[in-house]
Image (spheres, rainbow, N blue to C red):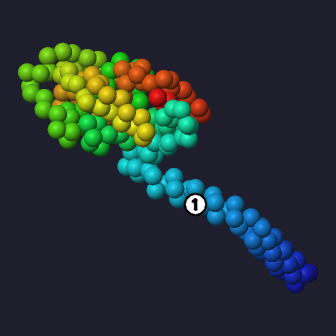
Amino acid sequence: MKRSSGVIREAFLWLLAGIMGFLIVFYFDQLMDKIKDFQKVTQSMDMKHHVRSPEVEKNAWENVIAIHANREGHFLTHAKINNEDALLMVDTGATIVALSYETAEDLGITVRDKDFNKAARTANGVSKVAHVNLEEITIGEITVKNIKAIVVEPGKLDVNLLGMNFLSKLSRFEYRGKKLILVQ
């Protein structure tokens, strides 16, 4: 009896291996396409922040990009501010673009202590802020020029915010599943 159950199990494993082999051969092209798509997505990610680069969507009349939500559901994206790299989180609750003091320094924006003459409510409470003008912000194919922003006092802002003063200069923006679509 033991021998027949062993033979049945071995036959079943051979059958299963045969089916798997057939499926791999039959679906090889689709499998390779999925692997390439996965590699493309993971190579475009900033693994520290779980951020994918903005995705340009084809449209002959408008500049359209898609920003993918990260694992936490936030829309973080790589951008150029005054032609320098920066990481921004889209925040429709922010009325204005907000930069951390540390990012402003990295961008070459000089803010002195006396410039922090206003107060603003942030996720970390009330902070002193300095008003600045940015030449431009570029995300993918979208560029908005002459943007007002605030720089938050040192250590008070963990992530730079892309506020409504940027978004309102676009033709439109919309949510599509786990994507935020920006159109200019």
Q: Residue furthest front?
A: 60
Image side of residue 121 versus residue 183, left or right: left
Residue 162, image x, y percentages: 36, 28
Q: Is residue 113 left or right of residue 120?
A: left
- Residue 144 found in image quarter: top left
Q: Residue at x 46, y 29 (%)?
A: 184
Q: Quadrant of the N terminus?
A: bottom right
Residue 16 x/y as whole percent: 80, 71
Helix, strand or loop for disc 1: helix
Q: Is residue 72 visible?
A: no
Establish if 104 lies above or below 34. Answer: above
Q: Is residue 58 visible?
A: yes
Give the camera-side residue of 116 and 174: 174
The location of residue 28, given as percent across then percent down, is 71, 67
| Side of 111 relative to 30 (left or right) | left
Residue visible at 56% across and 56% down in the picture:
38
Q: Nearer the viewer, residue 58 or 90?
A: 58
At 90% across and 81% down in the image, what residue appears?
4
- Depth order, front residue of 27/64: 64
Q: Which residue is tagged 1?
A: 36
Amino acid type of disc 1?
Lys
Is 134 located above or below residue 21 in the figure?
Answer: above
Above or below, 25 relative to 142? below
Count of numbered tags: 1
34 on left or right of 166: right
Q: Residue at x 36, y 36 (%)?
A: 138
Callout 1 environment at 10 Å: few (<14), some (14 to 19), or many (20+)? Answer: few
